[in-house]
Image (spheres, grey):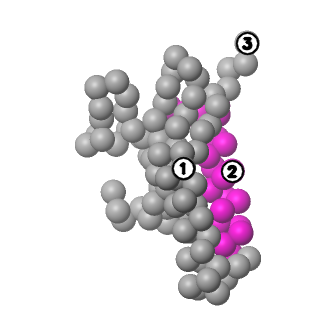
Amino acid sequence: MDSKYEVIVTERAKQELKEIYDYISKSLMEENTAIKMIDKIENELLKLETVPEGFSVIENYIRKDFKYRRLPINNYVAIYRIDKKERKVYIVRIIVEEII
């Protein structure tokens, strides 16, 4: 049995990744930096395949059926939830850290 979780990036989080890329590459005129940042974020998200519970719960985001967790990545944070039964991790947001 495969012990890994499937990491699923929601449409909203995909859009936020695009916005991060656009901001760094177009507004800051740093396309190479934008590529490196997106690669870093994607690599960090893959860690959730094996250690989804390895990051802290966001206390004010707890729901009845699940908890939201935060994965810090440089100036950003990925907000995610775990479906233990289905062995899936849902990335729901990727935002600038100061927002939460």
Residue to which mark 3 is pinned: 1
Residue 88 appears anywhere in the view:
yes
Amino acid type for the residue under numbered disc 3: Met
Of the numbered discs 3 and 1, the one sitting upstream in the chain is 3
User: Which quadrant holds the C terminus?
Assistant: bottom left
Does residue 39 lie above or below 64 as drawn? below
In terms of sequence position, does the residue under pointer 3 or pointer 2 come before the other?
A: 3
Nearest the viewer among 82 and 50 is 82
State the residue lying farthest toward the top: 1
> At numbered mark 1, what does the secondary structure look like: helix, strand or loop?
helix
Query: Could you tell me residue 50's position as x and y percent?
Result: 64, 31
Estimate how packed mark 1 is, as few (under 14), some (14 to 19) or many (20 or more) residues with alpha carbons within 10 Å: few
Spot the residue most to the front: 11
Amino acid found under the numbered disc labelled 1: Glu
Asked whether residue 95 is drawn in magenta, I would say: no
> Residue at horizontal 47%, vertical 46%?
92
Q: Which residue is mark 2?
A: 43
Tell me which secondary structure the magenta stretch mostly adopts: helix
Q: Disc 2 or disc 1, which is closer to the eye?
A: 1
Q: CA distance from mark 3 to mark 1?
A: 29 Å
Left/right placement of residue 46 relative to residue 93 reads: right
Q: Which residue is mark 1?
A: 11
Q: Element at badge 3?
A: loop
Residues rendered magenta in the picture: 33-54
**Secondary structure type for disc 2:** helix
**Quarter of the picture holding the N terminus:** top right
Badge 2 amino acid? Asn
Q: Nearer the viewer, mark 3 or mark 1?
A: 1
Tell me if I can see residue 54 in this picture.
no
Relative image position of residue 58 (x, y in whole percent): 34, 42
